[in-house]
Amino acid sequence: AELRIQRDLNQLLQPPGEPLACEPSEEQERQAREVFLLRRTLEEMETLVARDESVKKLLEMLHSKGPSAKASEEDHERTRRLADAEMHAHHLENLLEQRDKELAALREV
């Protein structure tokens, strides 16, 4: 997942056809955007870790009280898949939002 995020960031920060050499101000803007995206990603990951811990605690409580361990495992798997899907959707939304901003900025030029 981290490699995918890094690859997405690299693609986002290096649009196709753009030369690799940038003016210092462009490079600084790129770095600032990358830092911003990395901070946002870190915040999202921290939120997901906290959610995951909460889900684990709830599942442990249900498991100790519930009649079926298999049902608890299925619930845990469903919850995990849902959290993964939400994280992926949020990541894609962020990439689209950033791309839209960049396109709008290019249109203004």
Image: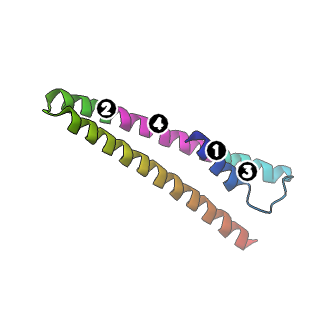
For the residues marked 3 and 1, what is the alpha-carbon distance in whole angstroms?
Answer: 14 Å
Q: Is residue 55 left or right of residue 90?
A: left
* Residue 53 image offset from top left, x and y in percent: 35, 32
Front tag of 1 and 4: 1
The answer to whether the residues at label 4 and label 2 have Cβ atoms under 8 Å apart is: no
Q: CA distance from mark 1 to mark 2?
A: 28 Å
| Labels 3 and 1 touching (C-beta < 8 A) | no
Badge 4 element: helix
Q: Secondary structure at mark 1?
A: helix
Quadrant of residue 83 in the image?
top left
Question: Disc 1 designates what residue?
Answer: 6
Residue at 42% x, 35% y is 49
| Numbered label attached to residue 46 | 4
- The residue that label 3 is drawn on is 30
Q: Is residue 48 magenta?
A: yes
Task: Categorize mark 1 by other alpha carbons within 10 Å: few (<14), some (14-19), many (20+).
Answer: few
First-in-chain label (3 vs 4): 3
Q: Are marks 1 and 2 in contact (CB under 8 Å)?
A: no
Q: Which residues are magenta?
A: 36-53
Residue beneath disc 2: 56
- Left or right of 85 on screen, residue 94: right
Q: Amino acid at mark 1?
A: Gln
The amino acid pointed to by label 3 is Arg
The alpha-carbon separation of the residues under discs 2 and 3 comes to 38 Å
- Whether 62 is drawn above or below 27: the answer is above
The answer to which of 89 and 74 lies nearer the viewer is 74
Q: For this rendering, which residue is in front, 79 or 28? A: 79
Residue drawn at x 79%, y 49% as measured from the top left: 27
Q: Please tell me whether residue 55 is drawn above or below residue 34 in the rendered image.
A: above
| Residue 48: quarter of image | top left
Cβ–Cβ under 8 Å for marks 2 and 3: no
Task: Identify the image quadrant of the C terminus.
Answer: bottom right
